[in-house]
């Protein structure tokens, strides 16, 4: 029996149509996986189902009755809630206040909120999903995984306002969770299926297969397939999404060429108090140098130090045979070092600015007229060059970056540093949140940059990706380097060999 049915949904923004006659059913008590490349239309569909976007055409029905949503509050009144990838919690408020935001009237007496009553109710909501979190704590004090559980508890408050089966939309809920945290989330979702149905959006196809009952595949704004989870494999889903099979050359190993002899950056005895110590590394021209390690190993801090975001307290950094100090990101940029951060939406892009403005940010001298004013025509032509070269999917270079898919946003960040002529790139989880097709495009760009002489420091979400892309892999544990491995094509180290030095 269908809980929610969508029929022939379409959505256009001016001349740009992003959804084309999309139809799907969400059955009572099931987990429906929703997959597709970045830009396939998944996010737009989820926004329509959550009430934040109205379709240009098409219909929705809930329990067989026509459904028109005028906003998120209207969706909530019908038992539809969303757990966002970009978490919607207010970090300066308590856990209890976040769980019941917008529902404060339930806890009012004589015009004032009764905090004890709210906290007691919040504990009951958390008990539904089997987790214990201090409901009086500020949400900023929680881990990302704990905040994700609070999001889920918040969605379940809809039970108090409706007697319907709930529909909970999970938008990339596992994108930055470790394996143990993923298992915890999955166990809670399975336990809640008696009272809720779920739509699960993820780029991690193996997770989609594990959690979902059925899987709907989207491509170019259309539904292109529906599969029972037990009848397909990851490779089948990959081909359905991108229109080609998942090859063994996924990491473009045949394009890997030996690095140059010239050392472009060398660190000796590098340290930052409480973060890392005695780090020695040499980065060669055209080399992809991967750094592996668990959270807290110091790998992130080392790369941030080399990007100018963390100051070294000991040791030296040499470039071109001369000692340099990278005390600020500006100094690193001046030395030809560009950083692509893991949080591209926060640190990598100015989301409300256009593609053109974001690309020119680090090379304004190229688009200035008389050293005073930006020549916007020149800026647009420059951006158009990168739009075409990197195959950035956008109607034009004036589109705000917040309107782009994650993969295309990442390409804009890459275009900025390529345009600036950076000869060293620090890539901090460059494929986080990207689908398999977008990842392949980023891998190709990494190989292209390496072949052109750019040296790359790489941190990755997975060991498989790190090993596949790197010429050399360093392993860190407890703030220092514990292993070094050559990683030539056909001679890549095994993951288990790296793990021995990580834990």
Image: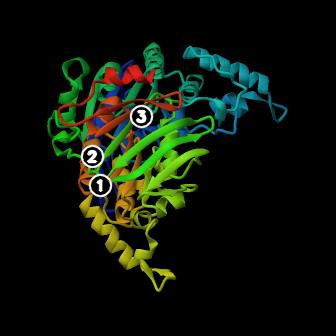
Q: Marks 1 and 3: which is nearer the front?
A: 3
Q: Earlier in the sequence, mark 2 or mark 3?
A: 3
Q: Is residue 35 above or below residue 495?
A: below
Image marks 1 and 2: residues in contact by CB distance under 8 Å = yes
Residue 221: mark in rendering: 2
Answer yes or no: is residue 65 visible: no
Q: Residue at 28% across / 49% down in the picture?
A: 446
Q: Which residue is mark 3?
A: 172
Residue 73 in picture, x, y percent from top left: 56, 39
**Residue depicted at 43% across the width and 22% down the height:** 179
Q: Dot 1: few (<14), some (14–19), or many (≥20) neighbours within 10 Å? A: some
User: How many marks overall?
Assistant: 3
Label 3 packing within 10 angstroms: few (<14), some (14-19), many (20+): some
Image position, residue 265 (x, y; %): 41, 51
To which quarter of the image does residue 256 belong? top left
Q: Which residue is mark 1?
A: 17
Asked whether residue 217 appears in the rendered view, the answer is yes
Mark drawn on residue 376: none
Asked if the residue at tag 3 contacts the one at tag 2, i.e. Cβ–Cβ closer than 8 Å, the answer is no
Q: Quadrant of residue 153?
A: top right
* Residue found at x 25% / y 57%: 452
Instruction: Using the image, determine if residue 248 lies above or below residue 499.
Output: below
Image x and y of residue 471, in percent: 28, 40
Q: Residue 156 versus residue 284: which sits nearer the camera?
A: 284
């Amino acid at each position: 029996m269908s809980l929610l049915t969508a029929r022939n949904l379409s959505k256009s923004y001016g001349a740009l149509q992003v959804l084309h006659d999309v139809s799907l059913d969400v059955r009572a008590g099931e987990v429906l996986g929703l997959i597709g490349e970045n830009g396939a239309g998944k996010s737009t569909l989820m926004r329509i189902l959550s009430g934040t976007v109205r379709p240009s055409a098409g219909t929705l029905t809930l329990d067989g009755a026509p459904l028109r949503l005028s906003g998120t509050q209207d969706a909530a009144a019908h038992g539809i809630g969303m757990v966002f990838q970009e978490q919607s919690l207010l970090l300066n408020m308590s856990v209890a206040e976040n769980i019941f935001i917008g529902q404060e009237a339930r806890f009012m007496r004589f015009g004032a909120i009764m905090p004890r009553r709210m906290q007691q109710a919040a504990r009951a909501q958390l008990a539904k999903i089997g987790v214990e979190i201090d409901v009086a704590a500020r949400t900023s004090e929680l881990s990302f995984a704990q905040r994700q559980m609070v999001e889920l508890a918040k969605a379940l408050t809809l039970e108090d306002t409706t007697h319907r089966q709930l529909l909970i939309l999970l938008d990339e809920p596992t994108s930055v969770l470790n394996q143990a945290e993923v298992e915890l989330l999955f166990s809670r979702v399975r336990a809640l299926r008696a009272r809720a149905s779920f739509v699960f959006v993820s780029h991690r196809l193996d997770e989609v297969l594990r959690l979902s009952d059925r899987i709907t595949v989207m491509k170019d704004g259309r539904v292109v397939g529906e599969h029972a989870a037990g009848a397909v494999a990851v490779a089948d889903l990959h081909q359905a999404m991108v229109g080609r099979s998942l090859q063994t050359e996924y990491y473009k190993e045949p394009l890997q060429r030996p690095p140059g002899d010239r050392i472009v950056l060398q660190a000796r005895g590098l340290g930052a108090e409480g973060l890392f110590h005695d780090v020695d590394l040499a980065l060669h021209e055209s080399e992809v140098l991967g750094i592996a390690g668990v959270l807290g190993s110091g790998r992130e801090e080392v790369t941030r130090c080399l990007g100018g975001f963390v100051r070294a307290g000991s040791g030296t950094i040499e470039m071109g045979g001369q000692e340099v100090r990278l005390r600020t990101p500006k100094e690193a940029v001046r030395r030809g070092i560009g950083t692509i951060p893991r949080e591209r939406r926060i640190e990598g892009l100015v989301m409300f600015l256009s593609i053109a403005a974001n690309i020119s940010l680090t090379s304004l001298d190229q688009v200035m007229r008389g050293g005073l004013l930006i020549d916007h025509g020149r800026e647009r032509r420059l951006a158009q060059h990168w739009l075409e070269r990197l195959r950035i999917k956008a109607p034009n270079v004036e589109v705000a970056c917040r309107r782009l898919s994650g993969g295309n946003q990442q390409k804009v960040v890459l275009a900025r540093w390529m345009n600036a002529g950076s000869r060293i790139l620090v890539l901090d989880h460059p494929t986080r949140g990207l689908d398999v097709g977008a990842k392949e495009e980023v891998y190709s760009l990494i190989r292209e940059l390496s072949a052109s002489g750019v040296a790359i420091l790489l941190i990755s979400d997975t060991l498989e990706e790190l090993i596949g892309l790197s010429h050399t892999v360093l392993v860190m544990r407890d703030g220092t380097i514990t292993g070094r491995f050559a990683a030539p094509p056909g001679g890549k180290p095994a993951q288990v060999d790296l793990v021995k030095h990580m834990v």
